[in-house]
Amino acid sequence: MSGGHILAIDQGTTSSRAIVFDGAFRSVAVGQQEFPQHFPHSGWVEHEPEDLWTSTLAVCREALAGIEGGASAIAAVGITNQRETTLVWSRKTGEPVYRAIVWQDRRTADFCAGLKREGHEDLFTRKTGLLLDPYFSGTKLAWILDNVEGARARAESGELLFGTVDSWLIWKLTGGRSHVTDATNASRTLLYNIDENRWDEELCGLLGVPLSMLPEVKDSADDFGTVDPEHFGAALPILGVAGDQQAATVGQACFRPGMVKSTYGTGCFALLNTGETRVASRNRLLSTIAYRLDGRTTYALEGSIFVAGSAVQWLRDGLGIIGTAGESQKLAEASDPENRLYLVPAFVGLGAPYWDPDARGAIYGLTRASGPADFCRAALESVGYQTRDLIEAMRADAADMDTDGIVLRVDGGMTASDWTMQFLSDVLGAPVDRPQVLETTALGAAWLAGHKAGVWPGMDEFSGNWHLDRRFEPRMAEAERAALYAGWQDAVRRTRSAA
């Protein structure tokens, strides 16, 4: 066994990564690979399941090749994953019946609307903490069963399995011996009762999902199976699993009620730790499981923004006005503040607190003077405005907590931009703390696995190793902050769908 090296798999929306952390929580080897995105219709987003698997396998081998001893130096594997993305495959052959339907996909909007009209949303929210929205896995799974020829009959006969990306990767890594998930991923399916910590028969019945398809639900630090030696040359235990946003919460050491983290990747996701108390949102946030350890559940309030870093990708790939993501900050800095644009990036609908799947992106304030620099500025500013939407809702929901003194811990690729983080602090009117380790999602999965393996310390010592890189303090005058945010709220009102 190693001296504390952990292999963390971070399977994301646009790329798969593997990071080896040493016993001092330092990244010592990395592998990363992008994979294709598929958009067969407006609002549809899909991945090839084989791409998720082969890219994960490749980056793990790359990372392991970068450390002395390779797989023999690894004590355990931790997995974190894009959540809500839905896969269905054969129990016998492992062959998927359809592409993975990605969390961003909106094809089940009409189905969700129908369930709402029938009066079911309160039931789903009471049991799962979620809203009836295409974002979550359950309606995606129902779509596959109803639209792939023969899928429902095969599922009802016990032939098919369902899983989110963590379940799919564990199934492949263990050679089909483990069909499991953890409580955080289960809590995002619309099928899991987060108070009773079990799959809910009534909800499964409403969505037409056979219970036989569902994986066993474990703690976030638990025995998920053993990697087949053929993959990495050693039989490695998988001991930690969490959905990406919950893993980032752990990696940011947000273990105390009232602590908030916000991750800026493809989307943006803010989580407020509410402890062992589940807080029911009155402002259309989600109640969710932050992590479950030793059978004890810690809850969170979550706000989900569908487009953050992907707005910068749009500038690069859709408009062609930048060559790399890093160029967006330079252009934003060069823009004229008088050319005030508001980009509402509802490319796949609006997430919290609006939950408007039919909204589509829009930009306001265009003049003949508007140019690429202004588009870049508007894209980066949209992340700050959307985050404020979430923080305002959290403050209202968690009035019993000291949310007025919120300090936002941030991570993810966009946090490397000082300009973006300063604007975030300005528009929030609150400090923003960027840690030295930005790979907090992978670090959270690594801590879950390392702690379970007995080679990494407990919460207190791990929290003591969280180190600040830079704190951004608000500089903007309150009047300007209020005026800018009022302009954003007006832009969102104009963008909302008639429904």
Image (cartoon, rainbow, N blue to C red):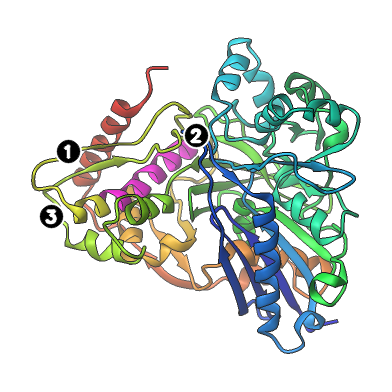
Task: Rate crowding at label 2 as few (under 14), some (14 to 19) or many (20 or more) other CA atoms within 10 Å.
Answer: few
**Which of 331 and 302 lies nearest the eye of the viewer?**
331
Mark yes or no: residue 254 visible.
no
| Residue position for label 3 | 336
Amino acid type at image mark 1: Gly
Q: Earlier in the sequence, mark 3 or mark 2?
A: 2
Amino acid type at image mark 3: Asp
Q: Residue furthest front?
A: 149
Task: Rate crowding at label 3 as few (under 14), some (14 to 19) or many (20 or more) other CA atoms within 10 Å.
Answer: some
Is 172 part of what is drawn in magenta? no
Element at badge 2? Answer: loop
| Residue position for label 2 | 41
Query: Residue 296's mark?
Result: none
Q: CA distance from mark 3 to mark 1?
A: 13 Å
Magenta region: which residues? 378-396
Residue at 69% from the left image edge and 62% from the top image edge: 54
Decide: is 150 above or below 451: above
Q: Is residue 176 left or right of residue 69?
A: right
Instruction: Report x, y in % for residue 130.
Output: 62, 31
- The quadrant of the picture occupied by the C terminus is top left
